[in-house]
Amino acid sequence: MRSVLVLLAACAAPATAPAVEPVEPAKPTAILGYVTASPPDEDGFTRALAAHDEATLERLLSIDLPAFESRARGNVPAATLARLDAAWADAIARGAPMLMFDGTRGDQEILTASVMRVGVWVDDRFVPIGPPVKDAVGGWYDAAHGRAITVGLQVNDCKSDFCPRISLVRVEAWSPTAKLLGKLEVKTEEAHAVVVESGAQLRVQLVDCTVQGCRTPWQSLDGKPGDGEPIRLVVDHRGTQLTLPHAGTTVRDATLVANDRSYALDKRHRVTELHCVAADPANAIVASTFDRCECDDGAAHVLMHQIDRVELATGALVEVAHGKGQAAIASGKSGVFVQRGNDRVERFASLADVGTSGAALPKGFLLLPPAGGRMCCGL
């Protein structure tokens, strides 16, 4: 009996499991984004697809996921795309609205872009949202409603009365997860600008004086009617005008109203309705763009800007900048970005720092494309 018990005990003893090396979790793919303004590397991606070069495909996807993801499916591991999707969503959530732009201006101030993408600036790089849009010349990322809006125009330089004229308008809106939210393509003969409003509802109308009131009916692309002042873009052959409200604030004449309290602004804010506002509990920034004619020296149409910072506790007004060119401001977790003039954007750590020396972004990254002029003297 003793030998049987020993045998049973031996059989019950657990076998020693072989040592298992710990498996490190897959590291998320790093987002490279763009550090210089350039179009997607279509040729490089096509060659990498043909060669089944997964390393190059992953590198190009990490630079411009929206441009290539649809073609990469089935050619790149699903786990790689899932990591990139997650990393992209994180970067967009931390970024501030930004454009990547490079282009030229031809006769009659017609703007043509070789690169025009909507996205965010984060971690010293540009992360695009949505694929490239043909004929794009303007756009904006409405972070509050998750819409990357791009406006494309085909312009007829007809060289006669009421020219140039727009012959085709193309508006697209994409979500941060590369879902197409809305698309509109309109052929026209007499339009001179396109107006886009993005709030609870995304809607578009044309400035066309062949219709009553020179405005076509609004066309809705996404969302439902709701409250709140919308972001407003007016895009024509010269560039983009931007009105960027901030919840809980309004600008009327030369007065900022925030938290039911009125604050005096510089009188120059009175002469325009183009205001970009950013605010936190301590400060508010108002960046306004207005235009005027300077005909004595032949300069003709001139865009000007006025940027002020208001200390909300005391009402103290600090002039940040005044000069030629347009102005805009945008903010996010990655900082505060201010454009003054046609080609200069500076980054600040907070609203309180705006007005000190900021860090300049590389050439080609702007809040607004460079604006052209218009005929205004002798009319």
Image (cartoon, rainbow, N blue to C red):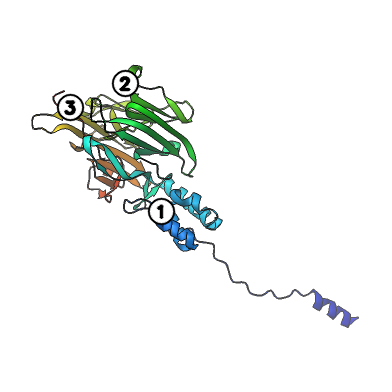
How far apart are labels 2 and 3 at the CA level?
19 Å
Residue 241 visible, this angle? no
Q: Which residue type does callout 3 highlight?
A: Cys
Q: Secondary structure at mark 1?
A: helix
Between label 3 and label 1, give the one nearer the viewer. Answer: 1
Tell me which numbered mark, 2 or 1, is placed earlier along the sequence. Answer: 1
The residue that mark 3 highlights is 376
Which residue lies under the disc numbered 1? Answer: 42
Q: Residues within 10 Å of mark 1 (few under 14, many from 20)?
A: few
Q: Classify 347 as above or below 237.
A: below
Residue identified by numbered label 2:
209
Question: Residue extending furthest top?
Answer: 212
Up-down relation of residue 47 to residue 277 (above or below): below
| Mark with earlier residue (3, 1) | 1
Q: Position of residue 123 (x, y in %)?
A: 36, 53
Disc 2 element: loop
